[in-house]
Amino acid sequence: MPEKGAPVFLDYDQAALDAAYHQAAFAPNREQLIKRRMSDSALARHRLGEAERVAYGPTGIERARSLSHRTCCGIGLHLRPRRGVADGRTAAAAFILGASAVQLGTAFLLCEEAEVRAAYRAALAAADDASTVVTDLISGRPARYIRNRLIDDLVGSGLEPPPVPAQYSLTRPLDAGGDREWTVLTSGQSAALARATTAAELVERLADETTRRLRAFA
């Protein structure tokens, strides 16, 4: 058995952490699954068209052009947008462009039932259309967050983040301080559309608004 190296996360050395993250030691058919996902992705791109580049703030990310007029042409795909949908207007737009369902995330974080810290609620309530950025400096993997001093300082440092989950183990504990400038503020791109309400009211309003807007196009 190879000698264990210095711990980099909990009691994991780098080799054990890599194995846990990549699942190479636990999934003997990993390469087969990767090839299957690549094949499925190629098929979707063939049907929908190549991905296009869009920029959200200073970071460029790739977005599959899943919502295009081609989706209305009977290509046999069930599309479920899960980014940028937060109200009846955005949900109706997705359905009009061919989606079979929509999925909301950030919209529920301002609901009374959501167990989020006060700093997180305050940041969501104050968010506007330019508040979010995509970065890998919080967890080591690209994700969207509400921009704050934590992100600005990490970007300004010029440092590369350590691998997942090591970086997250360094940034996540900062939440305990209760300062929104140093809290990890995971968010969707439509954070500005989130409203303080209850989950039941949000779902009821979403259904009513979506139905009303779809009827206007009937």
Image (cartoon, helix red, strand yellow):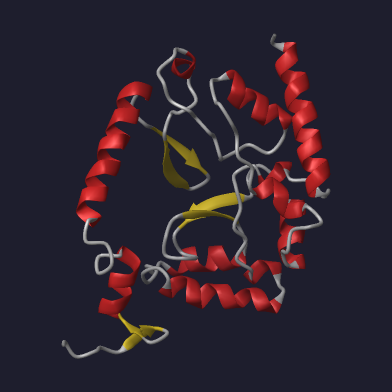
Q: Position of residue 95 (x, y in %)?
A: 60, 23
Is residue 218 toward the left or the right of residue 160 in the image? right
> Does 43 sit above or below residue 189?
above
Q: Residue furthest left?
A: 1
Q: Residue 13 at x, y = what percent?
A: 30, 83
Residue at (66% x, 30% y) in the render: 90
Classify residue 56 as left or right of residue 60: right
Residue in the foreground of this view, choosing between 8 and 12: 12
Q: Is residue 55 left or right of residue 48?
A: right
Q: Position of residue 119 (x, y in %)?
A: 73, 66
Q: Is residue 71 left or right of residue 85?
A: left
Q: Tell me how many marks there are.
A: 0
In which quadrant is the N terminus drawn?
Answer: bottom left
Question: Could you tell me which residue is drawn at 81 percent across and 56 percent down?
Answer: 112
Which residue occupies 60% across, 39% down? 103
Which image quarter is the C terminus in?
A: top right
Residue 98 place in picture, x, y as percent:
53, 20
| Residue under the point 22% across and 56% down | 29
Indicate the quadrant where residue 8 lies.
Answer: bottom left
Image vertical order of residue 139 relative to residue 5, above or below: above
Residue 25, compared with residue 101, is above or below; it is below
Is 148 situated above or below 217?
A: below
Q: Residue furthest top?
A: 218
